[in-house]
Amino acid sequence: MPSIDLSSLTFLKLTGSGFRTVFDDLAALRIAVFYDFPYLYEGSVDYEKTYLETYARAERSFLFTVYDGEQLVGATTALPLRDETADVQAPFLAAGYELDTIFYFGESLLLPAYRGLGLGHTFFNEREAHARQFGQYTMSCFCAVQRPDDHPLRPVNYQPLDEFWKKRGYQREASLQSEFVWPDRNETLETAKPMIYWTRGLV
């Protein structure tokens, strides 16, 4: 496969209702990336648009996109935890955190050909800078699905991102957990998946 020329890529930042201008492309990218392990997500465009409305309704939400020509090849999202859904907020409330001091980082999406180019760091840099500009948020967080090491669909060469996240200053908080439901690949029945949060101070 030819190497990617970073100079050929363009970047776009959107906030709030601006999300709606790229709903179709962003939904397609989420479905494509999350189809692979560890999410194994059998997605639908209708569900994706409902999910993305949470971001479109949040004034301080943030979307950073990567385009190669007209194609959306990467994106990352964030929004204040106060604007997230109850299932995301629940473990933080139970642990006594103040929601108005936390910024939640959603997905980081890159098509396989565009990985290993440093864009993962760019995604974190952009989201952290966006959160810091408000002078209100002292912590950022995100969550990751937990799959057993012996999962039958785990690729032999699969490398989790834990070390990358640690280098970014994030720590795994096993006490902060949610359960999200979605249908696994080639299935129609939704099942609950354990999600563990990672946190980092922003100040």
Image: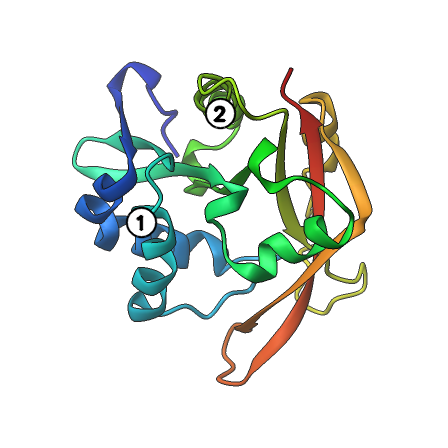
Quadrant of the frame with the N terminus: top left
The three-letter code of the residue at mark 2 reads Ala
Q: Which mark is residue 101?
A: none
Residue located farthest toward the bottom when viewing the structure as drawn = 189
For the rendered model, the colour scheme is rainbow
First in sequence: mark 2 or mark 1?
1
* Residue found at x 81% / y 64%: 150
Name the residue beneath numbered marker 1.
57
Q: Residue 35: tell me if it is visible.
A: yes
- Residue 37 vertical placement versus 172 (above, below): below
* x, y percent for residue 200: 69, 28
- Could you say which is closer to the camera, residue 202 or residue 162? 202
Residue drawn where x is 48% and y is 61% of the image: 35
On the image, numbered disc 2 is attached to which residue?
Answer: 131
Residue 117: percent from left, percent from top: 48, 22
| Residue 175 vs residue 63, the one in the foreground | 175
In depth, the one of 145 and 50 nearer the eye is 50
Q: Which image quadrant: the C terminus?
A: top right
Please report the residue visible at 29 percent of the width from the left and 39 percent of the height from the top. 16
Horizontal side of 158 relative to 189 (left or right) equals: right
Under mark 1, the amino acid is: Arg
- Secondary structure category for the residue under label 1: loop
Image quadrant where residue 154 sits = bottom right
Number of numbered labels in the structure image: 2
Gap in Å between the C-alphas at discs 2 and 1?
17 Å
Q: Residues within 10 Å of mark 1 (few under 14, many from 20)?
A: some
Expressed as whole percent of the image width and height from the top left, the position of residue 180 reads 60, 66
Question: Image point 48% across, 84% down: which residue?
Answer: 188
